[in-house]
Image (spheres, rainbow, N blue to C red):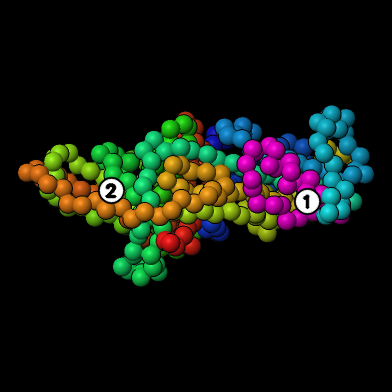
Amino acid sequence: MSVTRANTLTATWASVSAAAVLSAAAIYPLLALLASVAGGRARSELLAVAPTPLDLPVRGALGLWAREGVPLTLDWAARADPRLTGDPAIDRPLLDAWAAAQTGAPVPPFGFAVADEGALVLAAALAVTADWADPFTDGVLRPATGPWAGRRLASLHRRDPDLTALRCATTPAGPVTLLTVRGTGDVDVVLCTAGGTAPAPAVLAAAVETFTAAPVGRRGPGITAALVDADDPAPELVVKVPRFAASAAHDLLGAADVFGLRAAAAPGLFPGISTEPLRVAAAGVSVAAAFTGPGFRAAPVTRAPVVPMLPGPAEGTARALRVTVRFDEPFGYLAVHRPTGLVLMAGWVDTPEEAR
């Protein structure tokens, strides 16, 4: 139930903001916690978005912080959470150090501090790491059409005898191609494209809603198939995708209705925290991701030199099916916890790395 509601929140957020990287999974546990201590309309709005608790299956920094001087209930005071001073010079480094310590990875800095006497701050950061079961090779991608036409992009290439990772789904945004890149642990990354036929928010939201659905087929945007000469008649999947890195710090109150924070942002009662009126004066999440040859990383990594891949024609008497999927125009991605189906991160790539 919690995973479904968290993924619904991801789809809703993506449908209004196809950002380079976002993580509703990081903020969902905080919203559920805030709902448990809120009262009145704020509680109702929060429960509509996050009605049940959710334990993150990866390392994350999740904090609900109160301003110094706010009297706390005994239960809340026993949590021993740090208190904010209202001085940005003190609070911002405190939040940044806390996030790095909790996640074990560098994340974008939080861009807010609060001087409000009756303030609460929601802060979250998430780190996701996956090593590919089959690593990629650095290469160069030269799109012939679309927004990236004529550019030389740093790309990652891979050949795979397993075609089951590739599928096409029918969605409200039209046909969406989905490719699952399997990690060695519990995290996979799903790449998605509609071939430029639908807006980015619609494609990303559709991918969140359909990545677990049964495949419709393997004819879709970005996919080509051909019979080629080969030593082995077994079918082959060729993947070509730009290398990318993304980071973002999101102000959740800018989309308060999406997160059920409209009433919570106005002064009201949070009886589980304090007997005095409080308000959520700031809410943010910081996330970072990088899609590299060895795996998916929680933050940008040192880039390796680009070496064009030279496949060369195969010599042989057999004919084999070669299916190629190219992500050579803006596309989306999801980082998914395989055992639960929880979407940990989602994002849209429209600024790929140029080849050197």
**Within-10-Å neighbours for mark 2: few <14, some 14–19, many 20+:** some
Mark 2 vs mark 1, CA separation in Å: 45 Å
Q: Position of residue 332 (x, y in %)?
A: 45, 54
Numbered mark located on residue 238 in the image: 2
Image quarter (top left, top right, bottom left or bottom right) of the C terminus = bottom left
Instruction: Name the foreground residue: 302 vs 59.
Output: 302
Picture residue at 14% right of the left edge, 50% below the top:
228
Quarter occupied by residue 143: bottom left
For badge 2, the amino acid type reads Val
Task: Tell me the tag on residue 92.
Answer: 1
Q: Quadrant of residue 273?
A: top right
Q: Which mark is residue 132?
A: none
Estimate the x, y position of residue 256 in percent, counting from the top left: 68, 55
**Residue at (65% x, 51% y) in the render:** 108
Q: Which residues are magenta?
A: 91-116
On screen, residue 352 versus residue 87, left or right, reads left
Q: Give the mark, 2 or 1, whose residue is nearer the N terminus.
A: 1
**Residue 218, percent from left and from top:** 26, 48
Number of numbered discs? 2
